[in-house]
Amino acid sequence: MKNVEATFDEARDGFQPVAEGTYPAHCSSFGVNDWKNSKIFNLEFTIADEAQSLIVSKMRSSGNGGFIQEVDGDGVPVTISALYMVGKKFKNNGVWLTPKPAKGESWKNRRYKEFFEALGVDFPSEGGQVSLAEVEEHDVLGLPCLVNIKQQTFKNKEGEERTAMKVSSVFPWADGKKLSADELSSDVPF
Amino acid sequence: MGKITLTEAESLVKKGVLSKTAFSKMQKDGLVGTRKRGEKRYIKTAENTWVSPQFYFQGLNNKTESEEMKTLRNAVNDVIKKHTVTRQPSK
């Protein structure tokens, strides 16, 4: 056997499941689809460098397809640095906009308003009435926010149950800095 | 839209991700939980499976807990602690 310089340490280099929690992030991708009289906004968020200072729960396989909190010999939960989370991308659940809601159905746009306001979009308002506008890519790309990542269960086309880690909520990150298009694409290898 | 737990928000401040000013504003805007959750407790059923007791005030709906409610919560927590363990059931 010939020696090589490479090493592999399971603790350092092994697969580390994503821990649910709240992380600083930037909006890094934007998409919108039409569905009947509504629009669905699908965004992607990239975990920011600042997350590396956070300490999160260390997860391990539960043996049945899921993940559970790692505990030490005394039953105390094990924690690790969130450095491994930096740069990971997570999609949100689609946010719906109904541009022309029927009378009495304006409530349908509540989540749209709250989601994008939390992201830093400033909708004009007058006398307590907010005028919603259709958000475009340049309005949100690079905006900083705090994202709450949670495991979600869904059924695929074959009807099999699957899980995915998704952004369930977005909160303002007042101290975060907006990233430029160049900074957002800095991980592209060309 | 939900809330960030108080523990998570305090951790973000401690690690320098969130300033105290931003944290205060989030609290004012109702985006941060108001109390810390205790460590989850477990007790075994007659069939030897683990369950976790829960105590809450049904119908609270964002109202503030009174001092008597806090006293009751503390008393219930003491009873729960007496009969349960913190060890994770998966271990």
Image: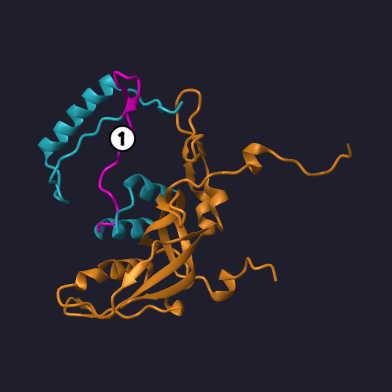
Q: Is B47 colored magenta in this rendering?
A: yes
Task: Answer left or right for A45 relative to B46.
Answer: right
Residue A108 versus residue A148 in the image, above or below: below
B83 above or below A120? above
Question: Measured from the top left, where is residue A53 in percent x and y?
Answer: 51, 49
Q: In which quarter of the image is residue A94?
A: bottom left
Residue furthest to the front = A158
Residue at 27 percent of width and 55 percent of height: B27
Q: Tell me the residue that label 1 is attached to.
A: B38
Q: Mark 1 lies on which chain?
A: B
Residue at 35% x, 67% y is: A95
Query: Which chain did the image draw in orange?
Result: A
Helix, strand or loop status at disc 1: loop
- Magenta stretch in the rendered image: B30-51
Amino acid type at image mark 1: Gly
Q: Is residue B58 left or right of residue B83?
A: left
Residue B43 on the magenta span: yes
The answer to whether residue B57 is seen in the rendering is yes
Residue A82 coordinates in the image, percent (x, y) = 52, 48
Q: Position of residue A24 (x, y in %)?
A: 46, 58
Q: In this structure image, what is the colour of chain B?
A: cyan
Q: Residue A15, how many percent across, how many down?
A: 60, 44
Q: Can residue B18 be seen in this view?
A: no
